[in-house]
Image (cartoon, helix red, strand yellow):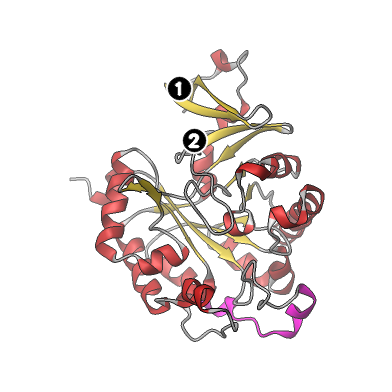
Amino acid sequence: MESHREREPVNAFTCELEDWFHILDTDRAPAMEDWSRLPLCAEKNVDRLLQLLEDNEARATFFCLGWMAERMPGLVRRCQEAGHEIGSHGYGHLLSYTVGSDVFLQDAIRSKKILEDITGQEVIGFRSPGFAVKNNNRWVFDVVAEAGYRYDASVFPAQHGHGGLCEADPAPHVIKTKGGSLIEIPSSTIKLWGRSVCLFGGGYLRISPLPLIRWGIRRLHREGRPLVVYVHPREFDPSHPRLPLKWRRRFKCYVNLRSTWPKLKWLCEHYRFTTMKTLAADLEPARQASPADTKGLEGPRQRVTVVDVTKRSPVSRQVHSN
């Protein structure tokens, strides 16, 4: 008889490889020129996570800051050698809309090169720090495509402190940019009392009680959508150093840190997890297809949303997907 884990949709586990002081949009965080003087705590936490993933035969995507990778290339290689995907989180943990498209492009290219030099493999996935894509900076998709990535994971299809595209398709889809088509794999959200909410990553995971998380996963799967979990190494390390944040940010960043590890352990024990690259592979035929060449693709037809950010209007096409 099939087990629950064998029947469920494929899910993705993601970790953003950054450190305890990489907190956005606050004057209490250290400037980049001061980072090298601070102790780094991420390595021991990521090693712990690698063991949890191995114990449960799970695979993950590590979206790495280029700055971190320069300082711990061995950790990046250990993640890769354990069968996990290496993706990019940019180099300097920049908020896209504060630096502009030119600086953000160079940052994305720099990170990609560093990670590829370390791993010897192409890096195809990108996640913007802070999920910082809003209606007024959709140029992020153009930048990600121009930098040479094939999929993006920057969309948060709900309200968010640094971004949020509430009207975005919450399922994986294809985005048409000036530099070509890009696969988008948004963070997982569900409708709760008429509003899109996230229960599956960061502070949302820490605050949400386990029964609510379990209910949300069942709802995602009923809708045919994968679960995408995201976590930062500091979030399962209650002993990590603290920044002197104001009370509201302090609550968002540090509440319920002790709850994270038991929830991650429960998730890995009850659900199958793979890489974002594996999820993106299902949409690769749609990314490559144009209206003139979809007939040549083999496989069953399914409806795929293609969002044309060059015209800012979503369209749907029938494409073949294996």
Dot label at residue 112: none
Question: Which one is nearer the viewer's eye here, 215 or 247?
Answer: 247
In the rendered image, the vertical position of residue 225 relative to residue 74, given as above or below: above
Q: Which residue occupies 68% across, 45% down?
A: 140
Q: Position of residue 80 (x, y in %)?
A: 59, 60
Which is more toward the observer, 226 or 54?
226
Residue under pointer 2: 282
In this view, 133 is above or below 36: above
The N terminus is located in which quarter? top left
Residue behind mark 1: 299
| Magenta stretch: dominant secondary structure | helix
Q: CA distance from mark 2 to mark 1?
A: 11 Å
Residue 72 visible to the viewer: yes
Q: Is residue 68 left or right of residue 198?
A: right
Magenta highlight range: 32-46
Mark 1 residue type: Gly
Tell me if 145 is positioned left or right of 20 in this view. Answer: right
Residue 309's spot in the image, x, y percent? 64, 32
In the rendered structure, are the residues bearing label 2 and label 1 in contact, judged by CB atoms less than 8 Å apart?
A: no
Quadrant of the rendered structure where residue 29 is?
bottom right
